[in-house]
Amino acid sequence: MAKNAMGAKPKTIYVCQNCGSESPKWQGKCPDCGEWDTFSEAVAPSSSLSSHNAWLGSAATMSKPEPITKISNAGWNRMQVPIAEFNRVLGGGIVPGSLILIGGDPGIGKSTLLLQISGLLAASGKVLYVSAEESNQQIKLRADRLNIAPDELYLLAETNMDYILQHIEQMQPALVIIDSIQTVYVPDVSSAAGSVSQVRECTSRLMRMGKSRNIPMFLVGHVTKEGALAGPRVLEHIVDTVLYLEGDRYHQYRLLRGVKNRFGSTNEVGVFEMSSDGMIEVPNPSAAFLAERSMGIPGSAVAVTMEGTRPLLVEVQALTSTTSFGMPRRTANGVDNNRLQMLIAVLTKRVGLALSNQDIYVNVVGGMKVDEPAVDLAVATAIASSFRSQMVDPGAVFIGEIGLSGELRQVSQLERRLQEAAKLGFSKGFYPLSPKPPALATDFNGEGVASLAQTIEDALLGEPELAEMPESYGEEDYD
């Protein structure tokens, strides 16, 4: 190991790459997280007075406390991205000096989206795109496919963080993109790129550079098999904003969702469509999700969910089928499986539907994942429609949370949801009964209902056709 400036060998410690705990000696099993073979060697921070002073800086350069009333916001306007959906998720634009971490599954479109943003913002200032995974020629091929060729977009294929910081210092770009943070390294740290020590040190140095120069930076982060961001948890604490690009790679829609934002709401979501021309924003997601809606077929209901300040209409499909096994299957795609089990129990106990011998499949069309309880009424209505072979009123939307006794509970922003449904041509809505009815459009018929059973009776059309119980096999079936 190299010696420091004083000629002494630096002290080493061992850091767990899973949880970040430190130990003076190597251990086979981490005592904190219980994982095996996760400790790697790292350089311990020096505790000498000289290094402490070097970290803090001299008295002349040290920052001083200021009264909050004396601090000016002049020159701190957000940088507007010419993509409205992206601005929505960030809270109105990019804040100068902010660190934004974007994670997502491999191939979901992270690099494509950031390259498009780089090309758009390069029209008003220098943009430095640092790729530690691809060569400049590979990025150029993608840029040619997306018709991106601004003069102020600079590509840098580099993994050494010291060199990257030198280029940033010399160029003073308006925006920096690091793709990805797990593949760059600091030579002073002996562990491999992507380890806890490397990720923490690289992100800290980028943060100090960005905050001191007011340069916003985008960091691409890898994810684990479970979908969480790889690396230490401190990575998410250092950055200002954490975004996830979600979606099924077999669907064309991608959702950009914020899970942390120091400068805006974390409830907003941006909708994009993956095409041969890159990521295209979807200004009206509700119309896109309902474009291929099944009309006149039992088992389909429309729910109105809130994603931040935006109401979204999604189609919920359900299919019931008599099981061939002793234990019926219950499969949910886009909704919580535990919530589905609860709704099936309520339909069985409170509504009287014999679902104990039914395989039940529920799907939210378009690859959407909806966790809001307000979709309970649409899910339960779709299941009842499929089981009774009755079509749901095609002009109706369903909004409401279902309790264990079968009652409907209030949801937030009911009027906004109903207004969005009326804009898209729906003429009727089922929602929880309230002492203060919501204001409705003149051509929209709202019906407040008190229970799930009443909703099913009012919303389903035609006569029910209940599924028959399968006959048990007799001895003659085996002759």
Image: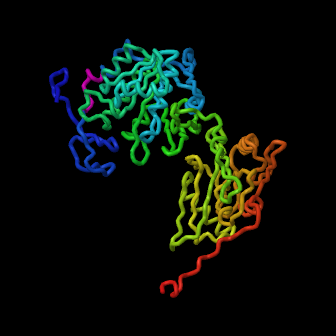
Residue at the (65%, 38%) spot, across then down: 310
Residue at the (64%, 55%) spot, across then down: 376
Q: Nearer the viewer, residue 2 or 440?
A: 440
Q: Position of residue 144 (x, y in %)?
A: 45, 25
Left-right relation of 287 to 31: right
Q: Is residue 51 magenta?
A: yes
Left-right relation of 102 to 469: left
Q: How many numbered circles does the render carry?
A: 0
Quadrant in the picture for residue 350: bottom right
Range of magenta residues:
43-52
Check the image and report above or below for 42 versus 445: above
Q: Position of residue 293 (x, y in %)?
A: 66, 49
Q: Is residue 436 magenta?
A: no
Residue at the (22%, 40%) spot, across then down: 24
Left-right relation of 211 to 355: left
Image quadrant in which the N terminus is located: top left
Check the image and report above or below for 433 versus 164: below
Q: Nearer the viewer, residue 160 or 240?
A: 160
Q: Position of residue 446 (x, y in %)?
A: 79, 50
Q: Nearer the viewer, residue 404 or 53?
A: 404
Return the residue found at the far right.
Answer: 442
Q: Position of residue 415 (x, y in %)?
A: 75, 43
Residue at the (42%, 20%) spot, across then down: 128
